[in-house]
Image: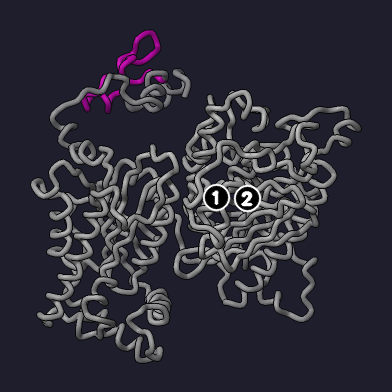
Amino acid sequence: MAPNRMQEALNPFKEVAQDSFLSVNDNDGGYDQNVLNPSASADYYAKGSVEAATESALTLDKIKHRIRLTKKNDRLVIVLVGLPGRGKSFIARKLQNFVTWRGSECRVFNVGKYRRQAADGACGADFFDSKNEAAAEMRQKAASLALEDMLQWLDNEDWSGTTTPTTPTGNVRKDRVSIFDATNSTKERRDWVLNECTHKTKRAGKPTGVVFVESICDDKDLLHANFLTKVNNSPDYKGMNEEEAMADLLTRVEKYEDAYETIEDDTQSYIKIFNLSSKMLVNHIYGRMAKSIVPALMAWNIGTRPVFIVRAGQTMNESERATRNCGMSRSENLGNKGMAFRDALFSHMRDECLDFIRRRQKAAFSPDLYTGTSMSGNMNKGGFGSHIDLASLSSPSHNEEEFEYVGTDGVTPLPFPCHIMSSTMPRARQTVGWENMPYHVEMLSNLNPLDKGDYTGQELEDLAVKSPEWYNKLVADPFYTRFPGGECYGDLTSRLESVVVDIEQQVGPVLVVSHVSVLQVLVAYFRNTPVENCTSIALPLNTVLKFTPAKGGGWQESQRNILNSPSNSHCDLNSMDNGMYCHGPPSVGYRTPLARTPVLSQMSVGSESPPDLISPLAAPPIWGDHVRGGVMPALPSENIL
């Protein structure tokens, strides 16, 4: 408000203000600079006090927990808490995959497994009665054995129990995260775990952080679904029919409920998850827990939705460049084959996404994506059920062309809903640049190819001659060898972390368009395979990888080639659980990531030492997207990566 207007407005209140000891002195038609100066008020509301902050006994007292808990510990224990059927093991598996992929070693210690071994098999509901002293003693013994093994694993870097392989060079030290998976349902049990992990004498010189993660569920429908999953999969109910197993589980839950104590000690670090991440409560969580694990816990949900991953379409070949009088560059556009793939991708995504909508409708579940778990998840503002009548999708008279989905602006009609993410490279953006279909595409530099620094634009076979020492390091350790002035594969997990969280929190179909190096790291996450081995993952051109959530927390994978290409490889998906990776047939010149990396069904990991030099055809596909003209005539133009 201008000074003259402010004066007119406040004149009637001067007398009241003076009576209330508020100074509004008139100075040449203005106001006291300390009270009613408009610019001073604006500065205050924009910046607050500009006085330098100083530490005091009060501030130090308030941040003492933050100071203690923000320290970087090489050892972290995540203690799960919750009644049976609350999704603890689901959380444990998701945590293990995410933390391992992120670069730490992680192992789950499931007390139930130790209990079954101690009891020589499954246990009935009476075994969990707090009044059953013999059973209580056995349960405590099982917990003690699990905790002992967990601490041994945390402390002994060479213990044979580790499940994460070290790198060939052995020069990368990883921190360790263990997950203590049990009900831990009483304060006494939790205090015991905390004391054993942090005892000043027993654990001297072995600083260990402890965080409790409690899963609370009071949604009856969700609990029933969880119970069904448990009785159909838990070893405790093997051989039992569903009705008997459910009755036993419900009795067991009642036994635990009689003694259950929720976490209330605010001096401890804990996270409470309500109804599988519909709400979260966080107390004294700092450092990497706040930066990485909390966002991941918030993102994970039990909904199903497909995630599609594709390489950017092919760029121009030599003849196309000559016709258009342009040279090769990072900003190169799609060529004719790339545009053909773009069109085929649109048709494929349309069929897949509409099929997903039909199956969701049949399941009588049509959430409003506008109120989904992600602000970027509102690809269809009206939701799956509000813009069109999903019931009519199953109608015999249904014509797909009649239905439209609404874009993020709430106006633009789209043929199907999908959250699309791509790198900032023109060829990636153009791969989803469907004509007259203005989808919102989230362009992320996080999805850009590996930065080769000083070696950008140079071929590996050239570097083998120019920089043999560095090149041999790359051959020995392709994951952690950093390009001078650039990145290594290990760096990609850091910049892809937010992408993974965003994908996980979506409630509808997701399409990711990127490049070989980035997609190798992403695929390692979805396959739950060691990320250090991701350079062995082949990604065929013109092929869509589809990942669908599994009930246990993992992902099911399928692949489909949607545009014929002589260089495409086929994967034995049935063997992937055994660690087998996809490799293109050498006869057609497809670049396998590393010839020295054996197919695991034929040779065990580490049984062959890396060669001194790898041949040009076996060069790791980490150059991004181009093969320099004339350098590698044995490779067809389809192999631009």
Q: Main secondary structure of the magenta part?
A: loop
| Structure colour scheme | one colour
Mark 1 vs mark 2: which is more N-terminal?
2
State the separation of the CA atoms marked 1 and 2. Answer: 10 Å
Task: Describe residue 634's horizontal placement relative to residue 89 as left or right.
Answer: right
Q: Quadrant of residue 19?
A: top left
What residue appears at the point 36 percent right and 50 percent down from the top-left corner? 105
Q: Is residue 473 visible?
A: yes
Label 2 Cα neighbours within 10 Å, binned few <14 / some 14-19 / many ≥20? many
For disc 2, the marked residue is 512
* Secondary structure type for disc 1: helix
Mark 1 is on which residue type? Leu
What residue appears at the point 59 percent right and 30 percent down from the top-left corner? 452
Percent of width and height locating residue 60 = 17, 32
Name the foreground residue: 128 vs 177: 177
Q: Is residue 507 visible?
A: no
What residue appears at the point 53 percent right and 24 percent down from the top-left corner? 485
Mark 2 is on which residue type? Val
What residue appears at the point 79 percent right and 56 percent down from the top-left corner? 563
For disc 1, the marked residue is 522
Percent of width and height locating residue 527 = 52, 58
Pick the quarter of the image with the C terminus.
Answer: top right
Name the foreground residue: 36 vs 285: 285
In this view, 589 is above or below 3 = below
Task: Describe residue 111's horizontal placement relative to residue 225 as left or right.
Answer: left
Labels 1 & 2 near each other (Cβ < 8 A): yes
Question: Which stretch appears magenta?
Answer: 14-38
Q: How many marks?
A: 2
Mark toward the viewer: 1 or 2? 1
